Amino acid sequence: QNMAGAREASLEALRRLETAGEADSEAMADTLANTATFYGALGQPEFDLPLQEQSLAIRKRLYGADPSVLPPAQAKLLG
């Protein structure tokens, strides 16, 4: 698989989401998590964790921090 190409596509998607004003959206959280996965697969864990943390922070703002009060689909997003 072309992980470097996938990472670059994810970075472009992040830029587009920011430009579109979607910095605190579920789409941004998903894209951050995906980008982190690509960095990890490419042996660059120093970029992985900060992106995962940003993704989680967005989801906590969107859904709250207590997964027990959320529908299962949203609770799963909080880990």
Image (cartoon, helix red, strand yellow):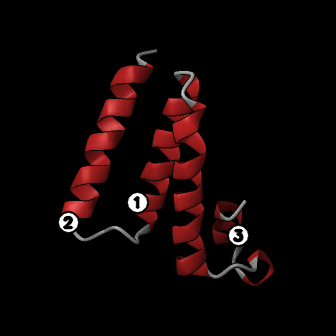
Q: Look at the numbered disc 3 and give the secondary structure of its residue.
A: helix
Q: Percent from the top left, x then y, of residue 45?
A: 59, 33
Q: Amino acid at mark 3?
A: Ala
**Residue in the picture at 56% in, 40% down:** 48
Name which of mark 2 and mark 1 comes first in the sequence. 2
Q: Pick whichever of labels 1 and 3 is earlier in the sequence.
A: 1
Horizontal side of residue 63 vs 20, given as left or right: right
Q: CA distance from mark 2 to mark 3?
A: 26 Å
Between 47 and 64, which is closer to the camera in this rendering? Answer: 47
Looking at the image, residue 19 sits to the left or right of residue 8; the answer is left
Which residue corresponds to mark 3?
75
Q: Quick check: 66 left or right of 17?
A: right
Judged by depth in the image, the label closer to the viewer, 2 or 3, is 2
Labels in figure, total: 3
Three-letter amino acid code of the residue under disc 2: Ala
Q: Quadrant of residue 44?
A: top right
**Category of crowding for the residue at label 3, using alpha-carbon neighbours closer than 10 angstroms: few (below 14), some (14–19), many (at least 20):** some
Q: Which residue ends up furthest to the front in the rendered image?
A: 46
Q: Residues within 10 Å of mark 1 (few under 14, many from 20)?
A: many
Q: Alpha-carbon distance for marks 2 and 1?
A: 11 Å
Q: Where residue 71 sits in the image (x, y, percent)?
A: 69, 77
Name the residue type under label 1: Met
Q: Classify residue 68 as left or right of residue 46.
A: right
Secondary element type, mark 2: loop
Crowding around mark 2 (Cα neighbors within 10 Å: few <14, some 14 to 19, many 20+) is few
In this figure, which residue is indicated by the disc labeled 1? 28
Residue carrying label 2:
20
Residue 79 versus residue 24 in the image, above or below: above
- Image location (x, y in percent) of residue 7: 39, 32
Extreme residue in the top direction:
1
Seen at 64% across and 62% down, the residue is: 77
- State the residue at coordinates (72%, 69%): 72
